[in-house]
């Protein structure tokens, strides 16, 4: 029996922070079951599919491997590409981006913002001594003044858990086309 192996690539919008956990997530469900149950794909195409699998190759890149029991036409491969596009944007992809391994943290951005805020804080702290007693009214102490001074200039004290320093790593809908190509024929 000849097995036809088709492949397509996928890119992620960022890098996963735990390669093994992300790989395990992509292989824990047998996506073949969902493909074969998808009534939008013609029965003869579903019957030709042996297996479909997402394989993470690097922290931001992978392959989707499709095994079929016969050679598939371009039109049939389009059905599979549409199915994959849907899975990567909704089902599998939505679950993927909600996992801890898909949290990309911008440590450099946080540190840069924190450094700027601390610079403003220090300026305010030093300015305290130049204020008149009247200007000091309304502040608890030098630290209170410095904090409010920094907040007026920067906004708020950066916190590494702020959403602005975290982005979801997901399937990149702009660069992924999911066009399958025959990779090899395997004799079993």
Image (cartoon, rainbow, N blue to C red):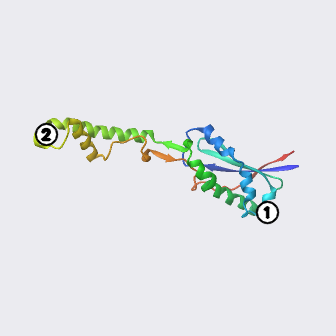
Relative to 161, is 54 on the left or the right? right
Position above or below: 13 against 118: below
Residue for point 72% across, 58% down? 80
Disc 2, SS: loop
Disc 1, SS: helix
Residue for point 60% across, 56% down? 89
Q: Which mark is residue 157?
A: none
Relative to 17, is 124 on the left or the right? left
Residue under numbered circle 2: 131
Q: Nearer the viewer, residue 36 or 122?
A: 36
Position above or below: 35 against 122: below
Whether residue 117 is visible to the viewer of this picture, yes or no, is: yes
The quarter in which the C terminus is drawn is top right
Q: Position of residue 175 (x, y in %)?
A: 59, 54
| Res. 40 image quadrant | bottom right
Residue under numbered circle 1: 43
Q: Nearer the viewer, residue 165 or 10?
A: 165
């Amino acid at each position: 029996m000849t097995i036809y192996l088709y492949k397509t690539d996928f890119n992620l919008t960022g890098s996963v922070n735990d390669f093994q956990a992300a790989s395990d997530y992509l292989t824990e469900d047998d996506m073949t079951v969902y493909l074969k149950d998808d009534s939008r794909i013609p029965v003869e195409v579903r019957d030709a599919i042996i297996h479909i699998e997402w394989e993470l190759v690097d922290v931001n890149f992978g392959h989707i491997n499709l095994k079929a029991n016969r050679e598939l036409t371009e039109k049939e491969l389009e059905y599979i590409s549409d199915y994959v596009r849907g899975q990567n944007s909704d089902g599998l992809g939505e679950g993927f981006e909600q996992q801890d391994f898909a949290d990309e943290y911008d440590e450099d951005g946080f540190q840069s913002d924190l450094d700027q805020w601390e610079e403003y804080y220090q300026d305010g702290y030093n300015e305290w001594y130049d204020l008149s007693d009247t200007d000091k009214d309304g502040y608890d102490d030098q630290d209170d003044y410095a904090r409010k001074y920094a907040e007026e200039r920067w906004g708020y004290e950066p916190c590494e858990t702020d959403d602005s320093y975290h982005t979801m790593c997901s399937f990149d809908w702009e660069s992924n086309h999911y066009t399958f190509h025959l990779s090899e024929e395997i004799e079993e």
